[in-house]
Image (tube, rainbow, N blue to C red):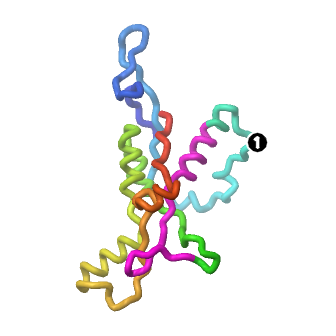
Amino acid sequence: IVEVLPDEDEEGNPLLDRNGQVKMVNYARFFFRWKKDHYDLPAKHFITPKASLSRADHENYKKMEDLANSIPKIIYTDGEGNDLRDKNGSLVTKRNYINTKSLLACRTKEEVAACFHSTVPPSVKEKEKRARDDGGDGGKASKNARTQHNSSAAHSKGGAVPPPSPSV
């Protein structure tokens, strides 16, 4: 669950303690397989009320919340690349998925930023798969998607910005 790695400054250089030794820090690592007995526990077992968090935990929670809110949304487009809009004229969007396994494997802020920018919406993956499998869209009406941070139109309209680098 815990991996001990050298502590680093903003530039990725190892930090030294007062004795000149490399300072080590504990990093949490998560298991990707759950055991059957995990499901025996009620959901409240895994929930910590905000009121019981320490000040430092509240600050960290806020950072995680800001990071989650900064992840670009998927903008749906038609087969010709035009943005789809709802009956009120707003863009049809939804939250993008995060590749948690890749994100947890990141060791630097740069890798985290690259992980977020390489996120491909599931609908785009499905369209690419159909194109590979049968040389086209499979005769189905496609619902394409793109992310706001990959759209020049979204940037010009004040759309998504790259996610903030998390503090380590």
Quick check: 61 left or right of 80?
right
Q: Which residue is mark 1?
A: 51
Q: Amino acid at mark 1?
A: Ala
For label 1, the SS is: helix
Q: Is residue 127 visible?
A: yes
For the magenta stretch, what is the residue range? 60-85
Closer to the camera in the image, 40 or 62: 62
Q: Quadrant of residue 93?
A: bottom right
Can you give x and y, in whole percent of width and height, for residue 120 in the image? 38, 63
Q: Vertical placement of 29 versus 102: above or below?
A: above
Residue that appears at 55% across and 76% down: 85
Q: Vertical placement of 156 versus 49: above or below?
A: below
Determine if the magenta segment contains residue 82. Answer: yes
Quick check: 128 left or right of 123?
left
Residue that appears at 42% across and 67% down: 146
Can you give x and y, in whole percent of width and height, for residue 83 in the image? 47, 73
